[in-house]
Image (cartoon, rainbow, N blue to C red):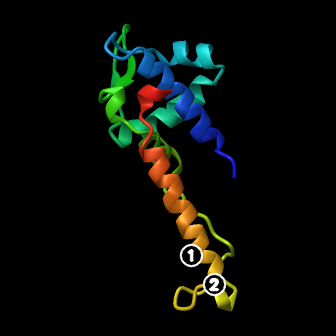
Amino acid sequence: MKLSTKGRYGLLAMEVLKDAYGNGPVSVNTIANEKNISEAYLEQLFSLLKKTGLITSIRGAQGGYELARNPDDITIGEVLRALEGEVELSCCDGDVPSCKEDSPCRMKSVLDRIESGISELTESISLSEL
């Protein structure tokens, strides 16, 4: 398993906002330069993070982005869900007759436990721990 570019870059950007928490907004340009991420890609990520209420934007010359809540109150799980959706592991694409919901294979229960463990872990880590 591998975290996608969206997830990795999103966490890197949120780390910058966490470090600046309480000191005003941070420009996309500043984050892009600090983390070597394109401004256009950051804007896409910030659109998702803003839509889920994790960050806010401030317009103007001194504008930028900042965390909507204290970094202690934002979990890594929230950030990853905003950027990548729910964790979903699958052993097949559902086209195999033995993988239907009414008669799931043994792998499904194992994968469900792994999904649950990942979710619990990411929900237990706050942004302030980055």
Kindly identify the residue that appears in the image at 44 percent across and 16 percent down.
19
Residue type at numbered disc 2: Cys
> How far is mark 1 from mark 2, CA to CA?
8 Å
In the image, 8: left or right of 17? right
| Residue under label 1 | 109
Residue 57 location, x and y as percent?
Answer: 35, 25
Q: Residues within 10 Å of mark 1 (few under 14, many from 20)?
A: few
Task: Decide: is 114 above or below 46.
Answer: below
Kindly identify the residue that appears in the image at 34 percent across and 30 percent down.
72
Q: Is residue 56 visible?
A: no
Q: Nearer the viewer, residue 82 or 46?
A: 82
Task: Decide: is 103 above or below 56.
Answer: below
Q: Is residue 102 visible?
A: yes
Residue 47 location, x and y as percent?
Answer: 44, 37
Q: Nearer the viewer, residue 120 or 21?
A: 120
Residue type at numbered disc 1: Ser
Residue 10 location, x and y as percent?
Answer: 54, 34
Corner quadrant of residue 5: top right
Q: Residues within 10 Å of mark 2 (few under 14, many from 20)?
A: some
Disc 1 is placed on an element classified as helix
Kindly identify the residue that appears in the image at 48 percent across and 45 percent down.
122
Disc 2 is placed on an element classified as loop
Task: Decide: is 62 above or below 127.
Answer: above
In the image, 84: left or right of 21? right
Image mark for residue 127? none
Residue 96 location, x and y as percent?
Answer: 70, 86
Corner quadrant of residue 104: bottom right
| Residue under label 2 | 105
In the image, 67: left or right of 125? left
Kindly identify the residue that appears in the image at 36 percent across and 8 percent down.
62
Q: Nearer the viewer, residue 50 or 16?
A: 16
